[in-house]
Amino acid sequence: MLDPQRKRDAADALLVLRAQLQEERAFTLLVHQHSGILRNYLARLVGQANADDVLQQTWIKAHRSLSHLAEPRAFKGWLFAIARREGFDLLRRLGKGEPADESGLEVLSLEGLSLEQQDPTTALCVQQGLARLSPKHQELLRLRYEYGLTYEELAGATGLNIGTVRSRLHNGKAKLRSLIEGEVQQ
């Protein structure tokens, strides 16, 4: 029996195959299923004001390039890679080097953290800790734990190899845990 995530991945892969065969309804379903999470990611990257434009550009590029995607199961990571490139392209054009994180108090559920994630104070500590991490650690932690990308999808989205993804996630979690525990003890 497949776990729910594998079922969703298999359903996505089937939709990708159908979309690659020019079935517009399949592509529309992919857009519907992934736009919310992509927009959230882009809002953090480029700010709320620019997120919709970058999202639209992401889908246009995805539609044009979908026939070149060799592995349909890699769709989510491939899509995030397009969104990431489009977002960073916009930031470069605007002369901004850093992502615009307007996340507020959203909770980041990191496995292995022994802190209660429902507590608003803890959520604030997590967000403050994330803000103090390097951009490379922030990005991987957010993509993994807020957006649910697998290691393979993270590698595809960022252009890193899986070993580097695992290492950065491990180091990022350790640094974040240390920062949070320091905040809670104070």
Image (cartoon, rainbow, N blue to C red):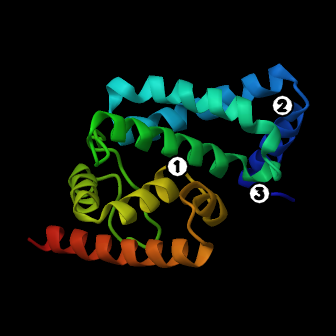
Q: Which residue sits at x=17%, y=74%? A: 182
CA distance separating discs 2 and 1: 23 Å
- Tag 2: amino acid: Ala
Q: Which residue sits at x=53%, y=40%? A: 83
Circle 3 residue = 3
User: Sequence order check: which comes first, mark 3 or mark 1?
Assistant: 3
The answer to whether one can see residue 66 in this image is yes
Is residue 91 found left or right of 34 in the rendered image? left
Q: Secondary structure at mark 1?
A: loop
Q: Residues within 10 Å of mark 3 (few under 14, many from 20)?
A: few
Q: x and y percent of residue 178 in the render?
A: 26, 77
- Tag 1: amino acid: Tyr
Q: 43 or 58, which lies in front?
A: 58
Q: Are marks 3 and 2 in contact (CB under 8 Å)?
A: no
Q: Secondary structure at mark 2?
A: helix
Q: x and y percent of residue 138 in the render?
A: 36, 60
Mark nearer the viewer, 3 or 2 = 2
Q: Residues within 10 Å of mark 2 (few under 14, many from 20)?
A: many
- Tag 3: amino acid: Asp
Circle 1 residue = 147
Circle 2 residue = 19
